[in-house]
Image (cartoon, rainbow, N blue to C red):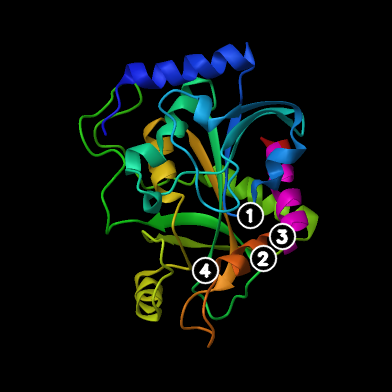
Amino acid sequence: MNYTFAQYQESAEYIRSKIGDFTPKAAMVLGSGLGFMGDVVKDPIVVPYKEIPHFKASTAPGHKGQLVFGYLEDKPVAVMQGRMHHYEGYSFEDVSYAVRVLRLLGADTLIVTNAAGCVRTDWKAGDLMLITDHIKMFSESPLRGENMPEFGVRFPDASSLYTPALRTLAREAAAELGIELREGVYFYCYGPQYETPAEVRAARILGGDAVGMSTAPEVIVAGHCGMQVLGFTLLSNMAAGILDQPLSEQEVLDAAEACKDKFSRLVLACLKKL
């Protein structure tokens, strides 16, 4: 569906009634198995998605489906514990709806995280990747339809969606922590089926380093809203065809659990530098 600006305002006003004058500086979208970051927010105010007008439910495993407002590293944040995916039956506008609402609430930076398959054969499962760019040219844009000038222009530039200054900040944080941080391109696929070996080979040829089912729609909308964006991928498994074994959802969740300490230290260090 095509939402109206009034609907975005209605969602923001409902949340404002719950959080008072709290204004998040950064919004965080937590991917599969990575929702634990929302559990360490200080002075939390929790707003379930199902209570917010026009919000959709998050049905993917490992996604709690709630907004958590509070403080991380003394920075006011809004944390999405769970995201919506196109494969859940939602439009790309549904998937990215929350980003615009959080922008209306004052967030000027979006930190996106996901768990994805590793396309590179010289990397390994469990590595962390700083997203430098994404590929999403085989599906429609979340900006399709009449433009909403209250948020941005009709034809937004997409040459630096993942803010260069924030990528520099992330590199510095990783170096200080002694965490190896890969850098690469996120290749968006619809899902919910995992990619075929042929699709993984195609992604590699086109320049993809990781394949996954999220992130790109939210980042496109964040860029349209004028937000800064920082993105991280947990390379939870080797993509199809690299190893002689089937892929599973449990493998993704297990990888997230194994990397939660490293991942949280990096994200918190980046927040501290904002």
Q: What is the residue that sits farthest to the left in this orientation? A: 146
Q: Secondary structure at mark 1?
A: loop
The residue to which callout 4 is attached is 117
Q: Give above or below for 95 relative to 70.
A: below
Badge 4 or badge 3: first in the primary sequence: 4
The kind of residue tagged 3 is: Glu
Pointers 3 and 2 in contact (C-beta within 8 Å): yes
Task: Measure the alpha-carbon separation of dots 4 and 1.
Answer: 14 Å
Residue at the image position 59 percent from the left and 34 percent from the top: 66
In the figure, is residue 11 to the left or right of 37?
left
Q: Which mark is residue 255?
A: 2
The kind of residue tagged 4 is: Gly
**Front of the two marks 4 and 3:** 3
In the figure, is residue 10 to the left or right of 23?
left
Quarter of the image with the N terminus in it: top left
The residue to which callout 3 is attached is 257
- What is the x, y in percent for residue 71? 73, 29
Badge 1 or badge 3: first in the primary sequence: 1
Q: Give above or below for 75 relative to 91.
A: above
Pointers 1 and 3 in contact (C-beta within 8 Å): yes
